[in-house]
Amino acid sequence: MIKKGYRNFILILLAAIIIIAAGYVIYKAYIKPIKPLPFKQVVTLYFYNPDTDTLKPEQRTVVPAAALLEKCRAIVAELERGSGTGLTAPIPADVKVNNATLQPNGILNLDLTKNLVMETPEGSSAEITAIYAIVNSIARNIDQVKAVQLTIDGKRLETLKMHIEIDQPIVPDYTK
């Protein structure tokens, strides 16, 4: 026979095991671990302000990218997405970044899809807006970039649409 003291000990031990097991089952079934939120970064993007016929900076919070190509793609995608304050999107829809490489002298070679050329409205104002929205936004948010050399589907063009030369690196101009 089991003595009364040992019997109580065994009962308490069994009760503790049952409580721990029930707590584990409840934890697994109902309590989900909290995933940490990704680090956020504030970027400055440039959108067209029709009232002043200039680009106006707008800040936005995004999930940062580590690689240069992904940073450039994120910035161009945010420009495409449009303004959160009612300004005009400076570039047409479906402009994508094919490639981005940074030279040691600070010139970013940025290869974009042909939609930039085909869908940008005619006129020098639309060209200036599209080009400088991209150049200013990228240079403002990627410290090493001093100028941007644009190419379209791997080809260096003389002009975007007959008005603005893009055959040489373009230095950001925050007064545009």
Image: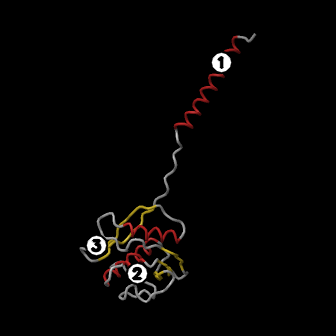
Q: CA distance from mark 2 to mark 1?
A: 80 Å
x then y, percent, for residue 29: 55, 36
Crowding at dot 3, Cα within 10 Å, few <14 / some 14-19 / many 20+, comes out as: some
As helix, strand or loop, the secondary structure at mark 2 comes to helix
- Asked which quadrant contains residue 89, the reply is bottom left
Looking at the image, do the residues carrying marks 1 and 3 touch, with CB atoms under 8 Å apart? no
Query: Which image quarter is the N terminus in?
Result: top right
Dot placed on the residue nearer the N-terminal end, 3 or 2: 3
Residue on which the image places disc 3: 49
In the picture, the disc for residue 11 is 1
The structure residue drawn at horizontal position 51% and vertical position 45%, both measured from the top left corner, is 34
As helix, strand or loop, the secondary structure at mark 1 comes to helix
Dot placed on the residue nearer the N-terminal end, 1 or 3: 1
Q: Amino acid at mark 2?
A: Val
In the rendered structure, the answer to whether residue 28 lies left or right of residue 94 reads right
x then y, percent, for residue 47: 34, 71
In the picture, the disc for residue 117 is 2
In the displayed structure, 134 sits above or below 156; it is above
Query: Which image quarter is the C terminus in?
Result: bottom left
Looking at the rendered image, the disc whose residue lies closer to the viewer, 3 or 2, is 2
